[in-house]
Amino acid sequence: MASVLRLGVWLISFIVAAGSVAAKPFIPADDAQVLERLPEKTNPSLAELKRLRSTLAKNPHDLALAAKLARRAIEAARETGDPRFFGQAQAALAPWWNSPEPPPAALLLRATLKQSTHDFAGALADLDKLIAARPGDGQALLTRATVLTVQGRYAEARADCTRIARRAVPLVSAACEAAPASLSGDAEQAYRSLIDALARAPGVDAGLREWALTLAGEIAQRRGDAASAEAHFREALALDPRDPYLLATYADFLLDRNRAADVVPLIKDATKNDNLLLRLALAAQRLPQMRAAFETYRADLAARFDAARRRGDSLHQREEARFTLAIVGDAGAALKLARENWKAQKEPADLRILLEAAVAANDTATLKQASEWAAANRLQDASLLPLMGKRS
């Protein structure tokens, strides 16, 4: 999701549409500085975002309009993988960004954006405040469950999911519970409950169904049930063949099964997204006929990660660690990145790159600590067993 579905991405995406884990927005010192022309002319939804910005500029304290713009910008960030849209969302909320007592709508969106920039402590502070004032706010509870899951605080996340059971449609409730439960010793029951909920909701919103199917695929994959995982991923792709998170998740599934040739047609036209470009490079690295393309992808990724570091962007720290280990071949640097990433988030993909880098760097202390964390949380993930050298 990042990841663990990254429930973080999917839950928040569903909430604001009613989602990614994202980077610190880059704000240029000069308002006239042009960083890049965003694809608004070719994308109607982004053209709508531009119109909303123009309208809000005339009345920046219109909360309803600011919230609409912020939600649409968050969606755009998830759709395109471009963190600059988070900057637009934050700009829309500027009148309330530093307020100690913003309106509930602004507070929820502020928490969402803080989560997106990996300010989990700030996001939880806002969510705690909102839930204290409005204990029945299902969206706030979902968002807090997401953040807690990303941090590996599974019991607390499940408690919030229990609280929303009476306030959300059954599939949302089942998926909320399945995410942390599947990572803390109850993977089989979480999977069964989620599959049952999907079966009982054939006519549910397509976006919600895709989110739940992706989560089901991830749980099945961690349980070692590759056939079911692929079936879920393919069904989700039929609902949205362009979703960046789903594409990255399925590409990883294929790479783990030495199906690099299947990855290329899946994501070859999505190279503007850093996460997808990484998967394309990893696939090309394994295909002799793509040697020239691989060199291009490697150089492009190196430049992008360098640019991200320069602007203080830690959005793709996990992906950079993976790039540094698998493509650059620098185990020590990869381990350093993986350790820093682990401080912020503790999803299965974060644990995996930490373990892989520790093995490659022969860092037995980190390997022991990571393995003990997985055992303590009763994490079930078939891909991690060879790295930990024992069964959980």
Image (tube, helix red, strand yellow):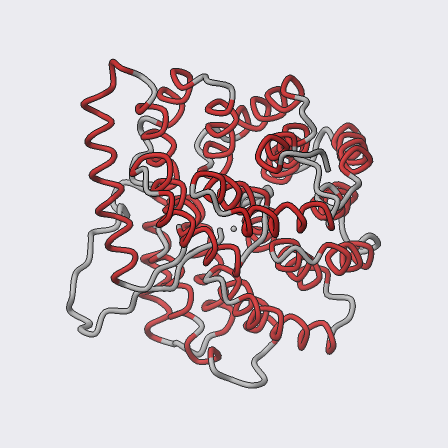
Depth check, front residue: 95 or 358? 358
Q: Furthest-bottom residue in view?
A: 100
Q: Nearer the viewer, residue 331 or 84?
A: 331
User: Could you say where residue 77 lies in the image, as x and y percent from the top left?
Assistant: 41, 51
Residue 297 percent location from the top left of the image? 24, 33
**Quadrant, the C terminus:** top right
Total numbered labels placed on residues in the image:
0
In the image, residue 201 sits, relative to residue 146, either above or below, namely: above
| Residue 326, above or below 378 | above
Image quadrant in which you'd find residue 127: bottom right
> x, y percentage for residue 316?
39, 50
User: x%, y% of residue 318?
Assistant: 44, 48
Tell me if 173 is positioned left or right of 221 in this view. right
Q: Residue at x 28, y 48 (%)?
A: 40
Q: Quadrant of the N terminus?
A: top right
In the depicted view, which residue is nearer to us: 98 or 340?
Answer: 340
**Rendering quarter of residue 31:** bottom left
Residue occupying the point 41% across, 54% down? 336
x 63%, y 24%: residue: 229
144 is higher (above) or lower (below) than 347:
below
The reply, left or right, for residue 381 in relation to residue 353 is right
In this rendering, position of residue 142 left or right of residue 310: right
Q: Is residue 176 left or right of residue 105?
A: right
